[in-house]
Amino acid sequence: MVGFGANRRGGRLPSLVFVALLVVIAILAFNCWNASSRQALLQEEVAELQSQAKRTEVARGRLEKRNSDLMGKVDSHKKQLEQKEADYSHLSSQLQARDGQVKKCEDSKVKPGAVGGGPRGPA
């Protein structure tokens, strides 16, 4: 008795199955090529973003250093300003004290002159 595949020749695939396999292989090859080119583009983009992040980090470091330097200068200027204000208030109080002494001195010179009739003597 002859089975279902008795009229087939041994080892050969029917042409429809063979064409279907070729189409599947072609589709898989195209997908593989497409995925590979996408991966290459994404790797280039990642490398570019990493270099940009590195440049940004370097610039940020420079800006932070400059900021800290400027903050140090601001602090030193504040201290100088406070010192100058303290010196000003000290000199102002000394000036007021001297003005008070000058007024006392002028008052003491005016009082005896008024009693004695002036610096020339009695008239």
Image: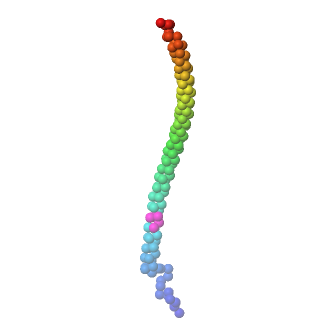
Q: Is residue 33 magenta?
A: yes
- Residue lying at 55% horizontally and 22% vertically, measured from the top left: 100
- Residue lying at 49% horizontally and 55% vertically, measured from the top left: 46
The answer to whether residue 17 is above or below residue 7 is above
Q: Is residue 61 visible?
A: yes
Q: Which residue is situated farthest in the front direction here? A: 123
- Taken as a whole, is the magenta stretch helix, strand or loop? helix
Task: Give coordinates of residue 116: x percent, y percent.
Answer: 52, 10
Task: Give coordinates of residue 33: x percent, y percent.
Answer: 45, 64
Q: Is residue 69 visible?
A: no
Q: For this rendering, which residue is in front, 3 or 25?
A: 25
* Span shown in magenta: 31-35
Q: Is residue 55 magenta?
A: no
Task: Give coordinates of residue 79: x percent, y percent.
Answer: 56, 33
Q: For this rendering, which residue is in front, 108 or 51?
A: 108
Task: Give coordinates of residue 91: x percent, y percent.
Answer: 55, 25
Q: For this rendering, which residue is in front, 122 or 70?
A: 122
Q: For this rendering, which residue is in front, 81 or 104?
A: 104
Q: Count of labels shown?
A: 0
The answer to whether residue 3 is above or below residue 105 is below
